[in-house]
Image (tube, coloured by chain):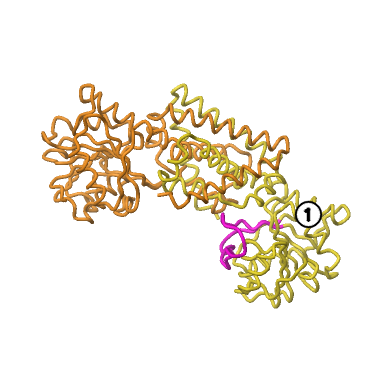
Chain colours: A orange, B yellow
Protein backbone atom coordinates (compact mmCIF):
# COMPACT_ATOMS: atom_id res chain seq x y z
CA UNK A 1 0.00 0.00 0.00
CA UNK A 2 1.20 3.44 -0.76
CA UNK A 3 -0.61 6.60 0.31
CA UNK A 4 -0.21 9.18 -2.44
CA UNK A 5 -0.49 12.30 -0.32
CA UNK A 6 -0.34 12.33 3.47
CA UNK A 7 -0.66 15.39 5.72
CA UNK A 8 0.42 15.56 9.36
CA UNK A 9 -0.98 18.33 11.55
CA UNK A 10 1.33 18.73 14.53
CA UNK A 11 5.05 18.10 13.94
CA UNK A 12 6.07 17.13 17.45
CA UNK A 13 7.46 13.87 18.75
CA UNK A 14 4.49 11.81 17.55
CA UNK A 15 3.84 13.51 14.21
CA UNK A 16 7.53 13.73 13.42
CA UNK A 17 8.15 10.09 14.31
CA UNK A 18 5.22 8.97 12.17
CA UNK A 19 6.61 10.98 9.26
CA UNK A 20 10.07 9.48 9.67
CA UNK A 21 8.70 5.95 9.97
CA UNK A 22 6.57 6.29 6.83
CA UNK A 23 9.40 7.77 4.81
CA UNK A 24 11.77 5.04 5.91
CA UNK A 25 9.15 2.48 4.83
CA UNK A 26 8.65 4.39 1.57
CA UNK A 27 4.94 4.14 2.29
CA UNK A 28 4.00 7.67 1.21
CA UNK A 29 4.55 9.45 -2.11
CA UNK A 30 4.25 12.98 -0.72
CA UNK A 31 4.22 14.12 2.88
CA UNK A 32 3.15 17.60 3.92
CA UNK A 33 3.01 18.95 7.45
CA UNK A 34 1.94 21.88 9.57
CA UNK A 35 2.70 22.93 13.13
CA UNK A 36 1.51 26.08 14.91
CA UNK A 37 5.11 26.51 16.13
CA UNK A 38 7.30 27.97 13.35
CA UNK A 39 10.38 26.40 14.96
CA UNK A 40 8.97 22.88 14.63
CA UNK A 41 7.99 23.63 11.03
CA UNK A 42 11.47 24.88 10.20
CA UNK A 43 13.16 21.91 11.88
CA UNK A 44 10.83 19.48 10.09
CA UNK A 45 11.70 21.04 6.75
CA UNK A 46 15.44 21.35 7.40
CA UNK A 47 15.77 17.77 8.59
CA UNK A 48 13.71 16.34 5.77
CA UNK A 49 11.04 14.97 8.09
CA UNK A 50 8.38 16.11 5.60
CA UNK A 51 8.47 17.06 1.92
CA UNK A 52 6.77 20.36 2.65
CA UNK A 53 6.27 22.09 5.98
CA UNK A 54 3.61 24.65 5.11
CA UNK A 55 2.10 27.69 6.80
CA UNK A 56 -1.40 26.48 7.56
CA UNK A 57 -3.34 23.32 8.28
CA UNK A 58 -5.53 24.01 5.25
CA UNK A 59 -2.49 24.23 2.96
CA UNK A 60 -1.12 20.98 4.40
CA UNK A 61 -4.28 18.95 3.83
CA UNK A 62 -5.15 20.23 0.36
CA UNK A 63 -5.20 17.16 -1.94
CA UNK A 64 -4.26 14.85 0.97
CA UNK A 65 -5.70 11.34 0.87
CA UNK A 66 -4.98 10.81 4.55
CA UNK A 67 -4.63 13.38 7.35
CA UNK A 68 -3.12 12.61 10.76
CA UNK A 69 -3.89 14.96 13.65
CA UNK A 70 -0.92 14.76 16.01
CA UNK A 71 -1.68 17.64 18.34
CA UNK A 72 -2.22 17.78 22.13
CA UNK A 73 -5.53 16.03 22.55
CA UNK A 74 -7.59 19.09 23.51
CA UNK A 75 -6.51 20.79 20.28
CA UNK A 76 -8.13 18.07 18.16
CA UNK A 77 -11.34 20.01 17.45
CA UNK A 78 -9.49 23.18 16.55
CA UNK A 79 -7.07 21.31 14.28
CA UNK A 80 -9.86 19.45 12.51
CA UNK A 81 -11.83 22.66 12.15
CA UNK A 82 -8.98 24.34 10.33
CA UNK A 83 -8.56 21.34 8.02
CA UNK A 84 -12.23 20.91 7.09
CA UNK A 85 -12.58 23.61 4.43
CA UNK A 86 -9.61 22.21 2.49
CA UNK A 87 -10.26 18.46 2.89
CA UNK A 88 -10.79 16.39 -0.27
CA UNK A 89 -14.18 14.70 -0.53
CA UNK A 90 -12.85 11.21 0.11
CA UNK A 91 -10.04 12.06 2.52
CA UNK A 92 -9.59 9.98 5.69
CA UNK A 93 -8.65 11.68 8.98
CA UNK A 94 -7.14 9.97 12.01
CA UNK A 95 -5.50 11.08 15.26
CA UNK A 96 -2.92 9.88 17.78
CA UNK A 97 -4.47 11.19 21.00
CA UNK A 98 -4.07 9.37 24.32
CA UNK A 99 -7.76 9.72 25.23
CA UNK A 100 -10.50 8.61 22.89
CA UNK A 101 -13.95 9.50 24.23
CA UNK A 102 -13.13 13.21 24.31
CA UNK A 103 -11.61 13.06 20.80
CA UNK A 104 -14.71 11.39 19.39
CA UNK A 105 -16.97 13.90 21.15
CA UNK A 106 -14.88 16.84 19.93
CA UNK A 107 -14.82 15.51 16.36
CA UNK A 108 -18.60 14.98 16.49
CA UNK A 109 -19.10 18.54 17.72
CA UNK A 110 -17.08 19.94 14.81
CA UNK A 111 -18.89 17.71 12.30
CA UNK A 112 -22.47 18.54 13.16
CA UNK A 113 -23.16 16.18 16.02
CA UNK A 114 -21.82 12.80 14.86
CA UNK A 115 -18.32 11.49 14.33
CA UNK A 116 -18.16 11.12 10.52
CA UNK A 117 -17.50 7.82 8.62
CA UNK A 118 -14.10 9.09 7.43
CA UNK A 119 -12.67 9.69 10.93
CA UNK A 120 -10.62 6.96 12.63
CA UNK A 121 -9.75 7.49 16.29
CA UNK A 122 -6.37 5.98 17.08
CA UNK A 123 -3.77 5.82 19.84
CA UNK A 124 -0.25 4.50 19.31
CA UNK A 125 1.09 3.16 22.63
CA UNK A 126 4.53 4.59 22.20
CA UNK A 127 6.36 7.70 23.19
CA UNK A 128 9.20 9.02 25.26
CA UNK A 129 9.45 11.77 27.82
CA UNK A 130 11.10 13.91 25.15
CA UNK A 131 9.17 16.38 23.03
CA UNK A 132 9.46 18.03 19.65
CA UNK A 133 10.33 17.04 16.11
CA UNK A 134 14.03 17.10 17.02
CA UNK A 135 13.46 13.93 19.04
CA UNK A 136 11.38 12.18 16.37
CA UNK A 137 12.45 8.63 15.55
CA UNK A 138 11.50 6.34 12.68
CA UNK A 139 11.50 3.42 15.12
CA UNK A 140 9.21 4.91 17.79
CA UNK A 141 6.27 2.70 16.87
CA UNK A 142 8.13 -0.45 15.83
CA UNK A 143 6.87 -3.47 17.76
CA UNK A 144 4.31 -1.35 19.61
CA UNK A 145 0.56 -1.56 19.75
CA UNK A 146 -1.78 0.96 18.16
CA UNK A 147 -5.33 1.01 19.54
CA UNK A 148 -8.17 2.04 17.22
CA UNK A 149 -11.52 2.83 18.84
CA UNK A 150 -14.17 2.51 16.10
CA UNK A 151 -17.41 4.45 16.38
CA UNK A 152 -20.83 3.62 14.90
CA UNK A 153 -20.99 4.44 11.22
CA UNK A 154 -17.22 4.43 10.68
CA UNK A 155 -16.19 3.45 7.16
CA UNK A 156 -14.39 0.12 7.17
CA UNK A 157 -12.29 1.31 4.23
CA UNK A 158 -11.11 4.28 6.30
CA UNK A 159 -10.26 1.98 9.21
CA UNK A 160 -8.34 -0.34 6.91
CA UNK A 161 -6.38 2.56 5.45
CA UNK A 162 -5.29 3.71 8.91
CA UNK A 163 -4.53 0.13 9.97
CA UNK A 164 -2.23 -0.32 6.96
CA UNK A 165 -0.53 2.99 7.76
CA UNK A 166 0.45 1.76 11.22
CA UNK A 167 1.51 -1.65 9.95
CA UNK A 168 3.93 0.17 7.63
CA UNK A 169 5.48 1.70 10.77
CA UNK A 170 6.09 -1.75 12.24
CA UNK A 171 3.23 -1.44 14.76
CA UNK A 172 0.45 -3.90 15.55
CA UNK A 173 -3.16 -2.72 15.50
CA UNK A 174 -5.96 -3.70 17.87
CA UNK A 175 -9.49 -2.38 18.28
CA UNK A 176 -11.19 -1.41 21.50
CA UNK A 177 -14.29 0.37 22.78
CA UNK A 178 -13.50 4.09 23.43
CA UNK A 179 -14.78 4.05 27.04
CA UNK A 180 -12.83 0.87 27.82
CA UNK A 181 -9.75 2.46 26.24
CA UNK A 182 -9.99 5.48 28.53
CA UNK A 183 -10.47 3.34 31.64
CA UNK A 184 -7.47 1.16 30.83
CA UNK A 185 -5.14 4.02 29.96
CA UNK A 186 -6.12 5.95 33.06
CA UNK A 187 -4.51 3.00 34.88
CA UNK A 188 -1.53 2.16 32.67
CA UNK A 189 -0.48 5.65 31.77
CA UNK A 190 -2.39 8.62 33.18
CA UNK A 191 -2.21 7.75 36.89
CA UNK A 192 1.54 6.94 36.75
CA UNK A 193 2.18 10.34 35.17
CA UNK A 194 0.24 12.07 37.96
CA UNK A 195 2.15 10.13 40.61
CA UNK A 196 5.52 10.89 39.06
CA UNK A 197 4.81 14.61 38.55
CA UNK A 198 3.41 14.93 42.07
CA UNK A 199 6.36 13.07 43.61
CA UNK A 200 8.96 15.30 41.93
CA UNK A 201 6.97 18.41 42.85
CA UNK A 202 6.91 17.26 46.49
CA UNK A 203 10.69 16.78 46.54
CA UNK A 204 11.23 20.37 45.46
CA UNK A 205 9.53 21.57 48.63
CA UNK A 206 11.51 19.46 51.11
CA UNK A 207 14.16 20.98 53.37
CA UNK A 208 16.68 18.50 51.97
CA UNK A 209 15.82 19.34 48.34
CA UNK A 210 19.40 20.31 47.51
CA UNK A 211 20.57 16.84 48.48
CA UNK A 212 17.92 14.85 46.60
CA UNK A 213 19.32 14.52 43.09
CA UNK A 214 23.00 13.96 43.97
CA UNK A 215 21.80 11.07 46.12
CA UNK A 216 19.42 9.53 43.63
CA UNK A 217 20.15 6.38 41.69
CA UNK A 218 18.87 4.46 38.71
CA UNK A 219 15.58 3.52 40.38
CA UNK A 220 14.82 7.19 40.95
CA UNK A 221 15.77 8.10 37.42
CA UNK A 222 13.42 5.51 35.91
CA UNK A 223 10.58 6.15 38.35
CA UNK A 224 10.61 9.89 37.60
CA UNK A 225 11.35 9.69 33.87
CA UNK A 226 7.73 10.38 32.90
CA UNK A 227 7.77 13.55 35.03
CA UNK A 228 9.90 15.04 32.23
CA UNK A 229 7.02 14.61 29.76
CA UNK A 230 5.41 17.58 28.06
CA UNK A 231 3.20 19.52 30.53
CA UNK A 232 0.95 20.68 27.68
CA UNK A 233 0.39 17.15 26.38
CA UNK A 234 -0.33 15.83 29.87
CA UNK A 235 -2.53 18.70 30.92
CA UNK A 236 -4.71 17.88 27.91
CA UNK A 237 -4.72 14.13 28.60
CA UNK A 238 -5.66 14.40 32.28
CA UNK A 239 -8.25 17.06 31.59
CA UNK A 240 -9.88 15.10 28.77
CA UNK A 241 -10.01 11.91 30.85
CA UNK A 242 -10.76 13.59 34.17
CA UNK A 243 -13.57 11.29 35.41
CA UNK A 244 -11.59 8.05 34.91
CA UNK A 245 -8.34 9.51 36.21
CA UNK A 246 -10.02 11.14 39.20
CA UNK A 247 -11.72 7.90 40.26
CA UNK A 248 -8.48 6.00 39.98
CA UNK A 249 -6.44 8.62 41.83
CA UNK A 250 -8.98 8.43 44.64
CA UNK A 251 -8.46 4.66 44.83
CA UNK A 252 -4.69 5.14 44.81
CA UNK A 253 -4.88 7.63 47.67
CA UNK A 254 -7.02 5.11 49.57
CA UNK A 255 -4.39 2.43 49.01
CA UNK A 256 -1.59 4.76 50.13
CA UNK A 257 -3.52 5.64 53.27
CA UNK A 258 -3.72 1.92 53.95
CA UNK A 259 0.07 1.63 53.48
CA UNK A 260 0.55 4.57 55.86
CA UNK A 261 -1.69 2.87 58.43
CA UNK A 262 0.43 -0.30 58.15
CA UNK A 263 3.60 1.70 58.77
CA UNK A 264 2.15 3.63 61.70
CA UNK A 265 0.70 0.54 63.35
CA UNK A 266 3.72 -1.64 62.58
CA UNK A 267 1.67 -4.08 60.49
CA UNK A 268 4.88 -5.25 58.80
CA UNK A 269 3.72 -8.66 57.65
CA UNK A 270 0.87 -7.06 55.71
CA UNK A 271 3.23 -4.53 54.15
CA UNK A 272 5.59 -7.27 53.09
CA UNK A 273 2.70 -9.26 51.63
CA UNK A 274 1.69 -6.20 49.63
CA UNK A 275 5.26 -5.95 48.26
CA UNK A 276 5.19 -9.66 47.44
CA UNK A 277 1.86 -9.40 45.62
CA UNK A 278 3.03 -6.41 43.58
CA UNK A 279 6.31 -8.03 42.63
CA UNK A 280 4.64 -11.30 41.66
CA UNK A 281 2.09 -9.54 39.46
CA UNK A 282 4.68 -7.43 37.70
CA UNK A 283 7.00 -10.38 37.12
CA UNK A 284 4.13 -12.54 35.87
CA UNK A 285 2.92 -10.03 33.30
CA UNK A 286 6.13 -8.24 32.42
CA UNK A 287 6.45 -10.02 29.09
CA UNK A 288 3.05 -8.66 28.07
CA UNK A 289 4.23 -5.06 28.29
CA UNK A 290 4.58 -3.51 24.87
CA UNK B 1 45.92 -1.21 48.41
CA UNK B 2 45.26 -4.88 48.65
CA UNK B 3 43.13 -6.44 51.35
CA UNK B 4 44.63 -9.79 52.27
CA UNK B 5 41.49 -11.54 53.44
CA UNK B 6 37.98 -10.22 52.88
CA UNK B 7 34.76 -11.86 54.04
CA UNK B 8 31.29 -11.09 52.70
CA UNK B 9 28.26 -12.09 54.76
CA UNK B 10 25.26 -12.24 52.44
CA UNK B 11 25.90 -13.37 48.86
CA UNK B 12 23.00 -11.64 47.15
CA UNK B 13 23.00 -8.94 44.50
CA UNK B 14 25.02 -6.49 46.62
CA UNK B 15 27.46 -8.92 48.22
CA UNK B 16 27.95 -10.82 44.99
CA UNK B 17 28.51 -7.65 42.99
CA UNK B 18 31.03 -6.36 45.50
CA UNK B 19 32.90 -9.67 45.30
CA UNK B 20 32.97 -9.59 41.50
CA UNK B 21 34.10 -5.94 41.44
CA UNK B 22 36.94 -6.57 43.88
CA UNK B 23 38.13 -9.66 42.04
CA UNK B 24 38.05 -7.85 38.74
CA UNK B 25 40.14 -5.07 40.31
CA UNK B 26 42.44 -7.69 41.86
CA UNK B 27 42.02 -5.79 45.11
CA UNK B 28 41.69 -8.81 47.41
CA UNK B 29 44.04 -11.73 47.92
CA UNK B 30 41.43 -14.10 49.37
CA UNK B 31 37.67 -13.74 49.40
CA UNK B 32 35.41 -15.89 51.56
CA UNK B 33 31.67 -15.67 51.80
CA UNK B 34 28.62 -16.96 53.62
CA UNK B 35 24.89 -16.84 52.91
CA UNK B 36 22.09 -18.39 54.95
CA UNK B 37 20.66 -19.70 51.66
CA UNK B 38 22.58 -22.81 50.51
CA UNK B 39 21.59 -22.07 46.90
CA UNK B 40 23.29 -18.66 46.93
CA UNK B 41 26.38 -20.25 48.53
CA UNK B 42 26.51 -22.96 45.87
CA UNK B 43 26.04 -20.47 43.03
CA UNK B 44 28.70 -18.15 44.46
CA UNK B 45 31.14 -21.05 44.63
CA UNK B 46 30.30 -22.52 41.22
CA UNK B 47 30.56 -19.19 39.45
CA UNK B 48 33.79 -18.24 41.16
CA UNK B 49 32.28 -15.18 42.83
CA UNK B 50 34.26 -16.02 45.99
CA UNK B 51 37.26 -18.22 46.68
CA UNK B 52 35.40 -20.08 49.39
CA UNK B 53 31.67 -20.13 50.13
CA UNK B 54 31.61 -21.59 53.62
CA UNK B 55 28.94 -22.96 55.94
CA UNK B 56 28.84 -20.29 58.63
CA UNK B 57 29.45 -16.60 59.16
CA UNK B 58 32.07 -17.46 61.78
CA UNK B 59 33.97 -19.66 59.33
CA UNK B 60 33.84 -16.92 56.70
CA UNK B 61 35.27 -14.19 58.93
CA UNK B 62 38.01 -16.21 60.59
CA UNK B 63 41.30 -14.44 59.77
CA UNK B 64 39.47 -11.77 57.72
CA UNK B 65 40.96 -8.27 57.74
CA UNK B 66 37.75 -6.75 56.46
CA UNK B 67 34.18 -8.05 56.78
CA UNK B 68 31.26 -6.72 54.71
CA UNK B 69 27.73 -7.34 55.97
CA UNK B 70 25.50 -7.46 52.86
CA UNK B 71 22.28 -8.75 54.37
CA UNK B 72 18.75 -7.27 54.47
CA UNK B 73 19.16 -4.36 56.84
CA UNK B 74 17.17 -5.80 59.76
CA UNK B 75 19.48 -8.84 59.76
CA UNK B 76 22.52 -6.69 60.49
CA UNK B 77 22.56 -7.34 64.25
CA UNK B 78 22.11 -11.08 63.83
CA UNK B 79 24.83 -11.26 61.16
CA UNK B 80 27.28 -9.26 63.24
CA UNK B 81 26.47 -11.35 66.30
CA UNK B 82 27.40 -14.54 64.49
CA UNK B 83 30.66 -13.01 63.26
CA UNK B 84 31.81 -11.56 66.59
CA UNK B 85 33.26 -14.70 68.24
CA UNK B 86 35.47 -15.36 65.20
CA UNK B 87 36.57 -11.80 64.36
CA UNK B 88 40.28 -11.00 64.44
CA UNK B 89 41.32 -8.37 66.97
CA UNK B 90 42.01 -5.69 64.36
CA UNK B 91 39.32 -6.60 61.81
CA UNK B 92 37.20 -3.86 60.28
CA UNK B 93 33.48 -4.45 59.68
CA UNK B 94 31.27 -2.47 57.29
CA UNK B 95 27.80 -2.86 55.82
CA UNK B 96 25.83 -1.90 52.69
CA UNK B 97 22.41 -1.24 54.25
CA UNK B 98 20.04 1.37 52.83
CA UNK B 99 19.21 2.83 56.25
CA UNK B 100 21.89 3.98 58.63
CA UNK B 101 20.44 5.05 61.98
CA UNK B 102 18.93 1.60 62.58
CA UNK B 103 22.17 -0.11 61.54
CA UNK B 104 24.22 1.96 63.95
CA UNK B 105 21.70 1.35 66.74
CA UNK B 106 21.64 -2.40 66.04
CA UNK B 107 25.44 -2.58 65.92
CA UNK B 108 25.66 -0.63 69.18
CA UNK B 109 23.19 -3.01 70.83
CA UNK B 110 25.26 -6.04 69.81
CA UNK B 111 28.50 -4.37 70.95
CA UNK B 112 27.52 -3.37 74.44
CA UNK B 113 25.82 -0.05 73.86
CA UNK B 114 28.13 1.85 71.51
CA UNK B 115 28.99 1.41 67.87
CA UNK B 116 32.63 0.28 68.02
CA UNK B 117 35.61 2.09 66.41
CA UNK B 118 36.10 -0.73 63.91
CA UNK B 119 32.60 -0.49 62.43
CA UNK B 120 31.99 1.66 59.31
CA UNK B 121 28.38 2.22 58.29
CA UNK B 122 28.09 2.47 54.51
CA UNK B 123 25.52 2.62 51.75
CA UNK B 124 26.38 2.17 48.07
CA UNK B 125 23.78 4.00 45.96
CA UNK B 126 23.50 1.31 43.37
CA UNK B 127 21.32 -1.66 42.72
CA UNK B 128 18.79 -3.11 40.35
CA UNK B 129 15.36 -4.59 40.84
CA UNK B 130 16.94 -8.03 40.42
CA UNK B 131 18.03 -10.15 43.36
CA UNK B 132 20.49 -12.91 44.10
CA UNK B 133 24.11 -13.69 43.34
CA UNK B 134 23.11 -14.86 39.85
CA UNK B 135 22.48 -11.20 38.96
CA UNK B 136 25.69 -9.90 40.54
CA UNK B 137 27.76 -7.62 38.33
CA UNK B 138 31.34 -6.37 38.68
CA UNK B 139 30.19 -2.99 37.33
CA UNK B 140 27.24 -2.40 39.68
CA UNK B 141 29.06 0.28 41.68
CA UNK B 142 31.16 1.84 38.90
CA UNK B 143 30.59 5.59 38.73
CA UNK B 144 28.17 5.47 41.67
CA UNK B 145 28.27 7.14 45.03
CA UNK B 146 28.85 5.34 48.31
CA UNK B 147 27.71 7.18 51.43
CA UNK B 148 29.55 6.56 54.69
CA UNK B 149 27.88 7.77 57.89
CA UNK B 150 30.64 8.06 60.53
CA UNK B 151 29.76 7.77 64.22
CA UNK B 152 31.56 9.27 67.22
CA UNK B 153 34.66 7.27 68.09
CA UNK B 154 35.01 5.64 64.69
CA UNK B 155 38.60 4.77 63.77
CA UNK B 156 39.79 6.89 60.88
CA UNK B 157 41.98 3.99 59.73
CA UNK B 158 38.87 1.78 59.50
CA UNK B 159 37.04 4.46 57.53
CA UNK B 160 39.98 4.84 55.15
CA UNK B 161 40.14 1.08 54.58
CA UNK B 162 36.48 0.98 53.63
CA UNK B 163 36.84 4.09 51.46
CA UNK B 164 39.68 2.47 49.52
CA UNK B 165 37.62 -0.68 49.10
CA UNK B 166 34.87 1.24 47.33
CA UNK B 167 37.31 3.25 45.24
CA UNK B 168 38.65 -0.08 43.96
CA UNK B 169 35.10 -0.82 42.73
CA UNK B 170 35.04 2.41 40.73
CA UNK B 171 32.74 4.17 43.19
CA UNK B 172 33.02 7.62 44.75
CA UNK B 173 32.78 8.00 48.52
CA UNK B 174 31.05 10.79 50.46
CA UNK B 175 30.31 11.19 54.15
CA UNK B 176 27.04 12.21 55.73
CA UNK B 177 25.30 12.36 59.09
CA UNK B 178 23.25 9.15 59.67
CA UNK B 179 19.99 11.00 60.41
CA UNK B 180 20.41 13.21 57.35
CA UNK B 181 21.13 10.12 55.29
CA UNK B 182 17.88 8.49 56.36
CA UNK B 183 15.84 11.62 55.65
CA UNK B 184 17.33 12.01 52.18
CA UNK B 185 16.94 8.38 51.18
CA UNK B 186 13.37 8.27 52.44
CA UNK B 187 12.77 10.81 49.66
CA UNK B 188 15.01 9.55 46.86
CA UNK B 189 14.47 5.86 47.28
CA UNK B 190 12.11 4.62 49.99
CA UNK B 191 9.02 6.64 49.07
CA UNK B 192 9.30 5.83 45.33
CA UNK B 193 9.42 2.13 46.18
CA UNK B 194 6.26 2.45 48.29
CA UNK B 195 4.50 4.32 45.50
CA UNK B 196 5.50 1.80 42.85
CA UNK B 197 4.56 -1.25 44.94
CA UNK B 198 1.25 0.33 45.94
CA UNK B 199 0.44 1.33 42.36
CA UNK B 200 1.02 -2.19 40.97
CA UNK B 201 -0.94 -3.71 43.85
CA UNK B 202 -3.85 -1.37 43.07
CA UNK B 203 -3.85 -2.39 39.40
CA UNK B 204 -4.27 -6.03 40.35
CA UNK B 205 -7.59 -5.22 41.98
CA UNK B 206 -9.13 -3.27 39.09
CA UNK B 207 -11.91 -4.74 36.93
CA UNK B 208 -9.75 -4.13 33.85
CA UNK B 209 -6.71 -5.85 35.39
CA UNK B 210 -6.45 -8.38 32.52
CA UNK B 211 -6.04 -5.51 30.05
CA UNK B 212 -3.43 -3.52 31.98
CA UNK B 213 -0.15 -5.10 30.98
CA UNK B 214 -0.89 -5.71 27.26
CA UNK B 215 -1.69 -1.99 27.05
CA UNK B 216 1.28 -0.72 28.99
CA UNK B 217 4.28 0.93 27.37
CA UNK B 218 7.80 1.96 28.20
CA UNK B 219 6.75 4.64 30.68
CA UNK B 220 4.83 2.05 32.68
CA UNK B 221 7.72 -0.40 32.55
CA UNK B 222 10.18 2.13 33.94
CA UNK B 223 7.79 3.59 36.51
CA UNK B 224 7.04 0.14 37.95
CA UNK B 225 10.52 -1.36 37.63
CA UNK B 226 11.30 -0.90 41.33
CA UNK B 227 8.10 -2.81 42.22
CA UNK B 228 10.03 -5.91 41.13
CA UNK B 229 12.58 -5.35 43.92
CA UNK B 230 13.09 -7.88 46.70
CA UNK B 231 10.15 -7.74 49.15
CA UNK B 232 12.41 -8.90 51.99
CA UNK B 233 14.98 -6.18 51.36
CA UNK B 234 12.31 -3.51 51.13
CA UNK B 235 10.32 -4.69 54.11
CA UNK B 236 13.49 -4.27 56.15
CA UNK B 237 14.29 -0.84 54.70
CA UNK B 238 10.83 0.65 55.22
CA UNK B 239 10.55 -0.85 58.69
CA UNK B 240 13.97 0.39 59.78
CA UNK B 241 13.28 3.91 58.49
CA UNK B 242 9.60 3.99 59.42
CA UNK B 243 9.46 7.48 61.02
CA UNK B 244 11.08 9.28 58.06
CA UNK B 245 9.20 7.27 55.45
CA UNK B 246 5.88 7.63 57.26
CA UNK B 247 6.22 11.41 57.50
CA UNK B 248 7.07 11.70 53.83
CA UNK B 249 4.29 9.35 52.71
CA UNK B 250 1.87 11.53 54.66
CA UNK B 251 3.13 14.59 52.77
CA UNK B 252 2.82 12.73 49.47
CA UNK B 253 -0.77 11.75 50.24
CA UNK B 254 -1.46 15.41 51.05
CA UNK B 255 -0.03 16.46 47.70
CA UNK B 256 -2.06 13.82 45.85
CA UNK B 257 -5.22 14.99 47.60
CA UNK B 258 -4.40 18.45 46.32
CA UNK B 259 -4.00 17.06 42.77
CA UNK B 260 -7.33 15.27 43.14
CA UNK B 261 -8.98 18.51 44.27
CA UNK B 262 -7.57 20.28 41.20
CA UNK B 263 -9.03 17.59 38.93
CA UNK B 264 -12.43 17.60 40.64
CA UNK B 265 -12.70 21.39 40.64
CA UNK B 266 -11.26 21.80 37.15
CA UNK B 267 -8.30 23.88 38.38
CA UNK B 268 -6.44 23.00 35.19
CA UNK B 269 -4.00 25.90 35.13
CA UNK B 270 -2.73 24.92 38.57
CA UNK B 271 -2.35 21.30 37.51
CA UNK B 272 -0.41 22.32 34.44
CA UNK B 273 1.82 24.57 36.55
CA UNK B 274 2.52 21.63 38.83
CA UNK B 275 3.55 19.55 35.79
CA UNK B 276 5.74 22.41 34.58
CA UNK B 277 7.45 22.79 37.96
CA UNK B 278 8.12 19.06 38.21
CA UNK B 279 9.49 18.81 34.70
CA UNK B 280 11.71 21.86 35.14
CA UNK B 281 13.16 20.54 38.39
CA UNK B 282 13.86 17.10 36.99
CA UNK B 283 15.46 18.49 33.83
CA UNK B 284 17.54 20.96 35.83
CA UNK B 285 18.98 18.35 38.17
CA UNK B 286 18.98 15.27 35.96
CA UNK B 287 22.72 15.44 35.41
CA UNK B 288 23.27 15.25 39.17
CA UNK B 289 21.62 11.83 39.39
CA UNK B 290 24.17 9.12 40.05
What secondary structure is marked by label 1? loop
Which residue is at the front of the view, B183 or A125? A125
Q: How far across and down, in percent of the image, does residue A59 sit?
A: 14, 38
Name the image quarter holding the C terminus of chain B.
Answer: bottom right
Q: Is residue A199 magenta?
A: no
Compared with B48, A18 (above or below) is above
Residue A13 vs B38, above or below: the answer is above
Residue under the point 61% across and 69% down:
B21
Query: What secondary structure prevails in the magenta region?
Result: loop
Q: Is residue B160 left or right of residue A105?
A: right
Q: Is residue B25 above or below residue B125?
A: below
Is residue B17 left or right of B281 when viewed as pictured? right
Residue extending furthest bottom? B29
Quadrant for residue B175, please give it.
Answer: bottom right
Please state which of residues A209 and B166 is positioned toward the viewer in this rendering.
B166
- Asked if residue B132 lies in the magenta stretch, the reply is yes
Residue at (71, 64) in percent of width and height = B35
Residue at position x 46%, y 21% in the image = B265
Q: Nearer the viewer, residue A284 or B19?
A: A284
Looking at the rendered structure, the number of numbered marks drawn on it comes to: 1
Tell whether A84 sits left or right of B108. Answer: left
Mark 1 burial class by Cα count in 10 Å: few <14, some 14-19, many 20+: some
Q: Where are the magenta residues, as a range?
A: B122-148
Residue A7, percent from left and from top: 19, 42
Q: Name the image quarter holding residue B9.
A: bottom right
From this view, report whether residue A116 is shown above or below residue A21.
above
Which quarter of the rendered picture does the N terminus of chain B lie within? bottom right
Q: Position of residue A265 (x, y in %)?
A: 73, 35
Tell me residue A139's x, y (percent): 31, 54
Chain hosting mark 1: B
| Residue designated by label 1 | B151
Amino acid sequence: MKVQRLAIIGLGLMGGSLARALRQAQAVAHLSGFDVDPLQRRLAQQRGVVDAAVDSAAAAVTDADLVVLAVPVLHTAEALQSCLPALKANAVVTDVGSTKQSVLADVAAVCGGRAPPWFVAGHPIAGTEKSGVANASADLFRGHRVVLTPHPGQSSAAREMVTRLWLECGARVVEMDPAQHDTIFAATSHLPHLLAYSFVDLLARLDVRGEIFPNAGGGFRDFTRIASSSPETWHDIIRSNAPSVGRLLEQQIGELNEVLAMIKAGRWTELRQLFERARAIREQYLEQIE
